[in-house]
Each structure stands twice: as structure tokens, then as C-alpha cells.
Amino acid sequence: MILILKADVDKDSPELKRLYEFLENFSGLNIRMVELEGETRAVREIHLIGPTHNVPEEVLAAMPGIERVVRVSTKYRQIGRHDVSFVPVGFTYNGIRFDQEGLHIFAGPCAVDTPEYIEETFKVLKNLGISTSRMGAYKPRTSPYDFQGHGAACLPWVFELAGKYDIKVIAMEVLKERHIEEITKALEDAGHPTGVMLQIGTRNAQNFELLKAVGSQTQFPVLYKRGMGLTIEESLNACEYIASEGNRNIVFCLRGIKSQLSSPHRNLADFIHVPVIQRQTRLPVCVDPSHAIGSKDRAPNGLMDIFNAAAQGVIAGANMILVESHPEPERALCDGHQSLTPRELEMFVEDVAIVRQAFEKRQNVYSQEIMKEMVS
Ligand code: PEP
Ligand code: MN
């Protein structure tokens, strides 16, 4: 059960004291205060977890200080929509708004390699007017003999270069709790020239201890990548692990699912699930066409499958795109075969803008239809 508090009720108010006293009558309840940053004001909620069946909804609704009582029937208590219209969807991090309306492109190499290539990557992004990037310092690789990433050693110069080119957020995968600490320290030492979105890779999609670790800090938002062999329900439950620890600043990323039937693509693009996640949760939704496709193959008309996959996500309303790019893909240490060159990235950005315009026009047609229905 969720109790949404009135705007003027803060932590020390007498209304809240009375509410807690009342709730003491019900044993076995886990009572948790959750604070959310809304568009116009902070929203405070009291979450009641456990045996709530005999907690009287009407009595609570009539208590001073309570704006609304929501009985949560769904299992996604924290990330679900619950049909509460004024509860905020999305969040702002380092000046960038992430919600179910906007669209951001996060481009960059699979793995951090040399300072020269990273500087070139940021320079290209700045020229394209993009302030969001991706790159891995810690790489989970299928073979132990492949490049595993430079780890903490590269963080100081990566962050410094990001600041130099006004990069506001870098999506960066973490494989264990220690990596969060290393990122925190490196950012602090560098004086916070940029921000980091902690990425949970598909291979760790059900690593519950790691999910709890990224969930129990609120400094960094989390980019959760759907498990390559997990249902939507299983992956949303994994996000619920993150959120139930206190961090609701989560972006849900679709990156294709593993199937023999995806051949010749690396994975089977599941981007039609964008609206499915949007209607079930408050999370912004990302698509990753690079790992879904896994090559730079083109149609006879010249369009890369990566472009077409991204277009599928954008036309369905995706809010973020993760795409791999590299100044010299043939020299990349990881996933060069699917990384766009700077010129290809420029065309990709143009292509996304065209598809996004089409998406906005489609939405317009729909809202005009609704208006007509309301008038008639
Ligand atoms: C990545 O984005 O760098 C990555 C490894 O992706 P995934 O976890 O989806 O395979
Ligand atoms: Mn990759």
C-alpha cells in the first residue's frame, strides 16, 4: 500500500507522527518513507509492505496529511505506474532529464582504450551537440583471454576528458560493488567534471547482490539492461530489486534477446517492448541497436541494420539509445565490427532525428483524434 503525503507534510510534522502511531496497531508491517523528486514539487510517500489486508484504506484516506491512498496490487511496487497521475515519471541527473517523453543518444566505444581515441570520441559528440556517452572500463567478456577493460586506472583521464568536452553523463558498466566505489572516488578526485550512469549488463541482469548494491546508493542513476534470456517480468522484478533498496532513478534498456532465430543478427531485437515497459512502469526506456544487431551489415538501399533497429525503437517512443562508435573501429579493442565511424555516427544522429519527427507526428495524429472524441 502506498500513502501519498500532502505537499506540506515533512518528516517532523505532527500529521506524520499521528500516522506512524496509527500504523503501530498493525503488526508485521514494514514502513518505509520514500522521497521522489517531482516536476513541480518533491513527493513524499509512505510504503507499507507486508500484511496490509486489514489496514483500513478509508481511515487512512481521511487522516490529515494524506493526499491519497493507493492499494498496490501489482508486484512492481516501486517502479510500477499504479495509475497515479501526479507521481513523477523519470528523473533529472547532472542537468539532463530522463523521462518517458525525451530522447537521448549515448554514443561511444564498447571499451575505453586510448586517451587519444576517447578524446576524439568526445570531440565528435560535442560537434554533434551530444553530451551523453557510453564506454566500459570494466568489461565482462565471453573469453578470459580477451581484453577485460582498463579498470579503475583509466577513470581519472576519462572523466577529465569528458569534462573538457562538456559530456554530462557516461553510461559505464559495473560488475561488482567495488567498481561503484572506484567510480565514486575517481569522480570525487577529479572534482566531478562529468556524471556516470551505472550500467548493469545483460550478463548480470539477475545478479541480485549487484542489483542491491546499485540500488542502495542514490548518487548515480542506473541503466538496467534486460537479461538476454529473461522475460520482461523477470527483468522488471530485477529493477524492482534496485528500486526497493532506495534508488528509483533507473532506465530500462532493451538490447535484444538471445535466440538461434536471430541469425544472422547477434540477438533478436525486442524493441516493440518499448511501450510495454512504458505502460507498466515509470521508467524511461532505452534501446541498444549495436548489441541487438552485432554487425554493420547494410540493406541494398544502403541503410545499416543498426540504423533500422534504432528506428524501430524510436518510432515506438524510445527515450534513450545506446550505440557503439569508435574513431577507428578496426582498431577498437572490443566490438569494433559493430562500431560506427564518426561519419556514420553523424548519419545515425540525422536518421534518428528523422524517425523521431515521424514519431512526434504519429503522436499528434493520435492526440487530435482524442480531442475530436472529447468534443463530440
Ligand atoms: C555493453 O553495452 O557494453 C554491453 C556489454 O552490453 P550487454 O550487456 O547488453 O551485452
Ligand atoms: Mn559492446
Image (cartoon, helix red, strand yellow):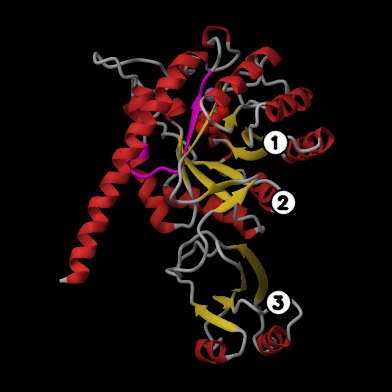
The quarter holding residue 47 reads bottom right
- Circles 2 and 3: CB atoms closer than 8 Å: no
Q: Residue at x 66, y 16 (%)?
A: 113
> Which residue is nearer to you in this view: 90 or 215?
90
Q: Which contiguous range is marked in magenta?
A: 313-325
Q: Is residue 313 visible?
A: yes
Check disc 2 and report the residue beneath it.
Answer: 217
* Quadrant in the picture for residue 300: top left
Task: Kindly state the secondary structure of the residue where label 1 is placed.
Answer: loop
Q: Does residue 10 lie above or below 256 as drawn?
A: below
In the image, residue 52 lies at what x, y percent? 56, 80
Classify 10 Å Cα crowding around label 2: few (below 14), some (14-19), many (20 and above).
Answer: some
Mark nearer the N terminus (2 vs 3): 3
Place residue 55 in its image quadrant: bottom right
Residue lying at the far right of the rendered structure:
189
Task: Tell me if residue 268 can be seen.
Answer: no
Q: Residue at x 50, y 58 (%)?
A: 89
Identify the amino acid type marked 2. Gln
SS for callout 2:
loop
Position of the N terminus, as image quadrant, is bottom right
**Disc 2 or 1, which lies upstream in sequence?**
1
